[in-house]
Image (tube, rainbow, N blue to C red):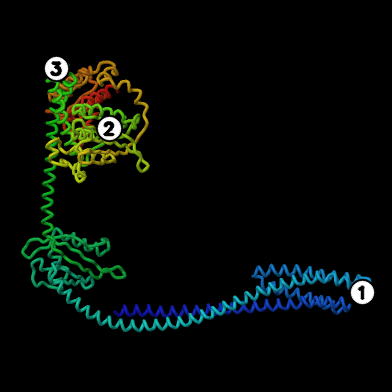
Amino acid sequence: MDKIFIRNFIIFALLLIGSVGILTYYFIHHDSKLEKFDDWIVHTYEVISEAEELDSSINSILAAQRGYLLTDDRNFLDRYHKEKSIIAAHIKNIKRLTKDNKSQQIRLIDLERNLETFYQKLEERTKDYNAADTKAAASKIILNEVENIDALRKKVILIHKDILKEEYRLLNIRVNALESKKKQYLTTLIGGVITGAVLLLIFNSFLLRAQRKRTKVEGDLQDAEDRFSLALEGMRDGLFDWNLKTDIVFYSAQFFNMLGYKNAVKNGTPEDFKNLIHPEDSDAVWHAVEQYLKGDLLEYNQEFRLKHKSGHWVWVQSRAKALFDKNNTPYRMVGAHTDISHIKDEQEKLEAEKQHAEEANIAKSDFLAHMSHEIRTPLTAITGIAEIFDRSLEGLSDKQKKLVKTLNSSAFSLKDLINDILDFSKIESNELELEEQEFQLEKLFAEVISMMSVRANEKSINFIFDDRQIKDTSFYGDPSRLRQIIVNLIANALKFTEQGGAVTVQAKFEDRDESQFLRVDVSDTGIGINPEDFDTIFERFKQADSSVSRKYGGTGLGLPISRNLAQLMGGDIFLSSQVGKGSTFSILLPMKIENLSAFKSDEKNTHKKLSEKIQSDLEGEYKLLLVEDYQGNVVVIGYILDEMGLAYDVANNGRVATELWQKNNYDAVLMDVQMPEMDGFAATKEIRRQEKQNNLEHTPIIGMTAHALVGDKDKCIEAGMDAYISKPIVEKDLKREIYKFLKQ
């Protein structure tokens, strides 16, 4: 309280001294201004006096000249020259006094010029008068010049009046300014006196208020102490107040009550607390305290165990704040201990549950990988045979053709379902990798049109595809994933559009934020979607209505996967729809676009089958090694190789594969990954080791795996494989990989 009083007293004293100083400065400053105004007025009077005397001298010089002409008395002539000198002196003084007034200086110059003309006329008249022969002639000369001289005199007098008029104007201004300053001076004086009186009154009221507040604060302090004592007794936290200078610690009752000690000491030493710390935590606790008191830690906050009276350990959270003197030396540390044993118990339970969940997740991943392999391996044979039968329908009855079509459609539906599940697994774990390559957009859409037109024809749906705006352009991105998105959206549109309806696909470019985007709109005339279900259909395993799933089928994965893929590409999928009228799904993707002409040169070959193109491009005989343990896949892949005109040997595991490779010179190896005795990874590493050891030519190895999960591709490349194909194998992908390496 005394410190506050002294502080406020100093503030008021400084304010009072400052006010007096400001008033003193103001009075001194204004005194100098008043003196300056007085000097200006005196100065103006001097100019007026000189100017008035100038008027008298001009009249005197004219009178002296006339007197000389009338009397021939040379005293008048002397008087004329004397007055002329007086006039020059007056003008000089006026010039000096008005040197800061440009307009007056101009008038004085004009006055001097006219006076010179006036003098010249007077002197010319005197000469003409003296030269006259007779009195009559002299009188005539005087009469002739009177008008000219009077005109010059009037002009001089007019300029003289302007000079006087200007000075009188300045005199009025300066007198008024002086009166204004005097009033301002008086007003400030009165204001200063009032301000000083007010400050003194405020200071006196402050003294009275400070005294009353001190009395009130003393009462409030006593109440606060009482409340604090009650709070200490009622709170669950144990408080401590450590005097670092005396090494005495005040402990609240709860500090020891939480440890089972009743009526424990309230004032003690740090040893009372130190003896209760768990031996494993003791060094860390005191190290943290020392680091905090040294200033190496910004705050003191740690968790450790204290021994309960019953013998078990209690977890506490310790928080404290230290006070430092001006030398940055700690002199007091106040803090609290909170029992957090229940929180630690919950943390242990959560950790156990987390570990259990992680183990379950690993087990799920292992199961998914195993089931993927077990399903995709025979699926390769099924889809391969279905494709072969679908291309060889000649000689079959209509019923047999229908069976083949059903087999082919069902096989690919099953493959799409498995691919969707695996894709969603990759997306969910944030490990889906997008390829980056340049591809022809027009060609991609041609493949989609060819594929989806068949489905549209089967349902008698009018299928319209407009890609005129994206002709002759190439893009840099992932063509397979873009194809997957478009196919998913068109398949959905066809599924929910009844017979006789229409599905329209339009591809175009769109400028947004000075960047070019690819926009693909897929519109249908199907059942439509309620706006409140827009978000639902993009959730996994969900559809807008359970009746939709019963009527149309589907897993509810296609749209969530498509949207996630679009977002991974930097874009998104948007929806607009009306129930009963249809829906429009719009894909918006930022793409790097370049005009292509190189693709056009090869357009003539697009109508050929890929196998025919490979046979025509490859020269010579090639032999491959097919490493596959599942006989169904051997049959299908062997059929593909036969169709390409390539010779091949078969090995049913990695050990046999390495033995055959050592004996024969193969142009490429198709290597399955999971096989008995020796898997594909080990076989590939062994082949690469022997190539390096014996300085042999590099043999291209194309990996084939049914796992197709995140990281499988990296494992194949790390093992030494040159490429990777997932099962079920797509025929054109396999042919392209073989063609690429044989062409090299």
Within the image, what quadrant is residue 57 found in? bottom right
339 sits left or right of 721 in the view: left
- The residue type indicated by label 1 comes to Lys
Structural crowding at the residue carrying mark 3, measured as other residues with C-alpha within 10 Å and reported as few (<14), some (14–19) or many (≥20): few
Q: Is residue 69 left or right of residue 534?
A: right
Label 2 Cα crowd, 10 Å radius (few <14 / some 14-19 / many 20+): some
Determine which residue is flagged by label 2. 479
User: Which residue is denoted by mark 3 in the rendering?
Assistant: 396
* Residue 625 rendering spot, x and y as whole percentages: 19, 21
Residue 686 visible in the current orientation: no
Q: From mark 2 to mark 3, how far is it between C-alphas?
A: 36 Å
Q: How many marks?
A: 3
Along the line of sight, the residue nearer the viewer: 268 or 201: 201
Which corner quadrant holds the C terminus? Answer: top left
Looking at the image, is 514 positioned above or below residue 19? above
Q: Which residue sits at x=80%, y=75%?
A: 62
What is the x, y in percent for residue 11? 37, 77
Q: Gap in Å between the C-alphas at discs 2 and 1?
A: 131 Å
Mark 2, secondary structure of its residue: helix
Q: Which of labels 1 and 3 is toward the front? A: 1
Q: Quadrant of residue 468?
A: top left
Query: Which quarter of the image is occupied by the N terminus?
Result: bottom left
Q: What's the residue type where badge 3 is placed?
A: Leu
Q: Which residue is mark 1?
A: 135
Q: Is residue 98 left or right of residue 551?
A: right
Q: Nearer the viewer, residue 61 or 66?
A: 66
Q: Is residue 440 above or below residue 544?
A: above
Q: Which of label 2 and label 1 is nearer to you?
A: 1
